[in-house]
Amino acid sequence: MAIVVDHIQGDPYAPASRLHLELSPEFHPNLSIPKDAFERLAAEDLFLREFARRLPDESMPAGDGGGGRFRTARPDATIRPRSAANFGKLLTLRFSYAFPAQNRRIMGEPAAEVLANRIPGMALDIANTVTKERIQELADHLRRRQSLRETMAEAGIVSFLPEGSCVRREESGLASPKAVKLQVPADLTTTLTLPDGTSLSGLAIRKGVTILVGSAFHGKTTFLEALETCRADLGPADGLAMACSTRKTETVTVEEDRRVGVCDLSAFFRRLPGQDPAKFSVDEASGATSQAANLVESLACGSELLLIDEDASAANFLTRDPTISRLLPEGESVVPLADRCAELDARGVSMVVVAGASSQWLAVADQVMVLARFQPQDATAKARAVAPAAGEKPPPCDWDFVLGDQLMEQWKELASVPATKLKVQDGMVRFAKAAESRLPRRFSSDDSLRGGAHLLCQWMRHCRDRNLPPTRKGLVGYLEAKRVSADAWGHAVGHDLAFPTGREAWALWTRMKAGSGDGEAEDED
């Protein structure tokens, strides 16, 4: 066992020092080197959760400021690579420690007590607790989820919620005490047989356009959030333990006042005042243009399932009233999303839309479900009977051109930004003095943004060192390779990075502008 100091704070009031704990297989029999990616992820997750639970209790407050306190990542319900735990040839657990100090001098006795005695004892307790059986059980669960994803893909299903799932969950992932378990009626039930011979019955969202309708407070938004949540891996005790969506699932909402880098919005706007829709950029986007930019951003990163809630959308982007359009002196300038559904479906992009204010969605739906008292009912036949006639279709969009690869020409100075100069707080990401970018917390957690910023800088260094042109497709491919690598993070990073989606990393780029961040900023807890 070894404790390594990666960065030591300058004074008692500076951000805490960064350290990591290295445990070799010789330290304990439970620390066997993982045989595959599933065992590695399972071991990392279990060891990190035990480490995060026990580490704060080892703090011995002393000295000035916050001296003597430990911190590490506290993972949410999702299971994914995090910088706080990495299992290659060694198990590495990263954490921060505010060295107890007075007048800029470290207090040796309390520091020695926790680092030489308490931390080794805690490490032994954790190794005793995280048994090989627990690791194997979680690894088998992750393998089963992956086999379900593969079975879904073969059956043309983009999301699947087994009978008994709880879409209303606590922050830990456990079912809420007031949760109503999913009961799927016979006419909506799909049974899938997995490669191991077992079967699962539940609600399948198939490729195409699925419309959710229902009265207020009957679970439509919660249902949509569950579909997004289960794109990630979840534990066997989770309320959505075996619920899965394609990993390339994205929620697309309004993001007013966001910065939009150069983006082709010609699929949705025929004209924009003072702008060419094919080369749109703005520092503060409106509701419709921000949602259009978010949708194009998601499509460009390979999204296969788009989740759209009418309550979090620009109404004039989703549908258009032809009667109102006839009043416009220059004619309608917006091509609503409802008019592009069929084209996106033909490209393999599905949608789940929570709708209620416009019946135009019924005309383009492949499947319509009503949520009543939190339970789904099939309303497809009834919807087709009452759906309005489809309006005149717009000219087809050249999606290959709109979503063509994009060269990341600016901000190459990010290649020189080290991990210690990245600062993230409440959705604001500062790349030292080079640039800054902001994403609302509803789009991404700070830990994911830290991971995205770190890997974005890694990508720029990768291109610089190999004389490669940095492109969006290259970035997304780089992240996919990193996700399954033995160590996605490299050395000397903090404990608070979670692996982002490709869209999250690209979203940092598309929102980037010249920054005025503190060039001396360090990682904070």
Image (cartoon, rainbow, N blue to C red):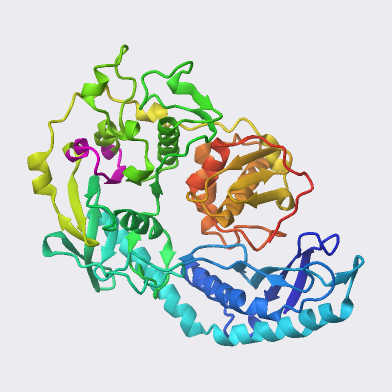
Q: Quadrant of residue 468?
A: top right
Q: Which residues are magenta?
A: 345-362
Q: Is residue 259 above or below residue 114?
A: above
Q: Residue at x 35, y 74 (%)?
A: 177
For residue 41, side relative to residue 23 (left or right): left
- Which residue is outermost to the front? 216
- Which residue is outermost to the top? 329
Q: Residue at x 54, y 62 (%)?
A: 81
Residue 478 picture location, percent across and down: 54, 47
Q: Split into 4 quadrants, where in the image is the C terminus?
A: bottom right
Q: Quadrant of residue 439?
A: top right
Residue 208 included in the magenta stretch of the image: no
Q: Is residue 270 above or below residue 2?
A: above
Residue 408 picture location, percent across and down: 58, 33
Taking the image as drawn, is residue 27 in sight? no
Residue 340 picture location, percent across and down: 28, 32
Taking the image as drawn, is residue 201 in sight? yes
Q: Residue at x 84, y 69 (%)?
A: 64
For residue 76, side relative to residue 117 (left or right): left
Q: Is residue 12 above or below residue 392?
A: below
Q: Quadrant of residue 383?
A: top left
Q: Split into 4 quadrants, where in the image is the N terminus?
A: bottom right
Give 126 or 359, whichever is nearer the viewer: 359
